Image (cartoon, rainbow, N blue to C red):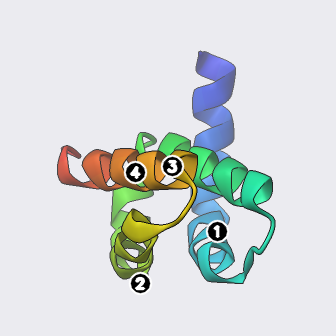
Amino acid sequence: MARNHKGCLYLIKNDLVPILVDKILEEKVQELLIKVLDIIKLLLEGEGGTDSFLETSGIKRLKGLLTHENPKIRQRAVTDLGCVSFSE
């Protein structure tokens, strides 16, 4: 757990969140998009992750996935949006 926490902090501090938010639109391979959404969730749970996310167009992009044809992508978009709304 501590290793994962340190890794998330490193990625947040090195501005990976905006890059991942851009990948939401750019990624055409659905399995890779699912991985991107999974990583965003982990970063949203990290210290400073939500603040970094809110500085991007992430909410708009996640909302756009709520009607995606792939139910796994829709589910992960909902989960990520939930992580934003429940941040402290």
Q: Residues within 10 Å of mark 3 (few under 14, many from 20)?
A: few
Looking at the image, is mark 2 or mark 4 earlier in the sequence? Answer: 2
Q: Which mark is residue 57?
A: 2
Q: Is residue 42 left or right of residue 87?
A: right
Q: Nearer the viewer, residue 4 or 27?
A: 27
Of the residues shown, which amino acid type is indicated by label 2? Ser
Q: Rounded to the nearest whole Å, what is the CA distance between mark 3 and mark 1?
A: 20 Å
Q: Neighbour class for label 4 at 10 Å: few (<14), some, many (≥20)?
A: many
Q: Secondary structure at mark 4?
A: helix
Nearer the N terminus, badge 3 or badge 1? 1
Location of the C terminus (image quadrant)? top left
Tell me residue 59's x, y (percent).
Answer: 34, 73
Mark 4 vs mark 3, foreground winner is: 3
Q: Which residue is mark 1?
A: 20
Mark 4 → mark 3, Cα distance in angstroms:
14 Å
Q: Amino acid at mark 4?
A: Asp
Q: Nearer the viewer, mark 3 or mark 1?
A: 3
Instruction: Label 2: state its secondary structure.
Output: loop
Q: Quick check: 5 above or below 9?
A: above
Q: In this view of the protein, which residue sits in the foreground, 41 or 69? A: 69
Amino acid type indicated by mark 1: Leu
Image-quadrant location for residue 16: bottom right
The residue where tag 4 is placed is 80
- x and y percentages locating residue 27 in the rendered image: 75, 74
Q: Secondary structure at mark 3?
A: helix
Residue 30, position in %: x, y?
Answer: 73, 60
Task: Find disc 3 in the rendering and name its residue.
Answer: 71
| Closer to the camera in the image, 41 or 8 | 41
